[in-house]
């Protein structure tokens, strides 16, 4: 009887508080409803675990190394993993050097990432207080490992006679996880260009590290 109750369902909407027991939700034909109840990232944002950071204007670079145009660091001892949901890049000015923007991950280190510190904002309400720390023109403890090419960059100039480069956003969807003491950096391998400036962004969820 108890097993039967545990698997019981009820058609229609349920409003439950945290810690309350509920029934499996069923549709009109008795099917189990497993679709997302809200927007995909709403739960993480509602619980204060989803964060955004936007860089200042910065040259995207020409090679991968210890100086990164943008980095998102997870300090040692933070107690969380940074689960990357989105990364973005937007054109500001100048002529970009042709090349490719790489997503790189720095190996675990007790040496902190440094640079021009950025203010992270909570996805819900815009408050501060994230564990993850963003930097423009960051200095990394060591050259990171290249994980993926994320954007191709054309040698283009934003003028009245040429189209502006489009803003680029990648839905990472948790395929990159930054553990404690590691970092994500976005760096270009390509040409110097002429005074190229872009802005980078990242959206991540802070998930407590599971022990054992």
Image (cartoon, rainbow, N blue to C red):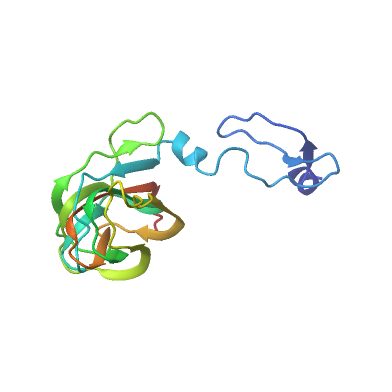
Quarter of the figure that contains the C terminus: bottom left
Position of 87 with respect to 58 (left or right) is: right
Residue 177 position by quadrant: bottom left
User: Is 149 situated above or below 7?
Assistant: below
Residue 183 visible? The answer is no
Residue 68 position by quadrant: bottom left
Front-most of 115 and 177? 115
Q: Residue at x 37, y 52 (%)?
A: 87
* Residue 73 image offset from top left, x and y in percent: 25, 53
* Residue 21 image offset from top left, x and y in percent: 65, 36
Quarter of the figure that contains the N terminus: top right
* Residue 79 image offset from top left, x and y in percent: 31, 50
Front-most of 157 and 170? 157
User: Is 175 situated above or below 14?
Assistant: below
Position of 100 with respect to 196 (left or right) is: right
Position of 183 with respect to 11 (left or right) is: left
Residue 186 visible? The answer is yes
């Amino acid at each position: 009887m108890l097993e039967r109750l545990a698997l019981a369902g009820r058609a229609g909407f349920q409003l439950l508080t945290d810690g309350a027991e509920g029934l499996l939700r069923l549709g009109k034909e008795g099917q189990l409803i497993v679709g997302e109840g809200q927007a995909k990232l709403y739960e993480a944002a509602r619980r204060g675990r989803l964060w955004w950071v936007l860089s200042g204007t910065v040259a995207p670079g020409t090679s991968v190394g210890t100086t990164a145009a943008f980095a998102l660091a997870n300090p040692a001892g933070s107690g969380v993993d940074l689960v990357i949901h989105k990364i973005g890049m937007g054109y500001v000015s100048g002529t970009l050097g042709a090349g490719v923007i790489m997503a790189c991950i720095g190996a675990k280190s007790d040496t902190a990432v440094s640079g021009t510190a950025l203010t992270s904002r909570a996805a819900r309400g815009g408050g501060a207080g994230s564990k993850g720390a963003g930097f423009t023109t960051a200095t990394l403890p060591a050259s990171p490992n290249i994980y993926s090419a994320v954007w191709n960059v054309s040698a283009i100039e934003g003028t009245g006679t040429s189209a502006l480069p489009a803003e680029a956003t990648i839905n990472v969807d948790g395929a990159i996880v930054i553990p404690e003491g590691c970092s994500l950096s976005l760096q270009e391998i390509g040409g110097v260009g002429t005074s190229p400036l872009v802005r980078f962004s990242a959206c991540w969820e802070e998930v407590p590290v599971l022990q054992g």
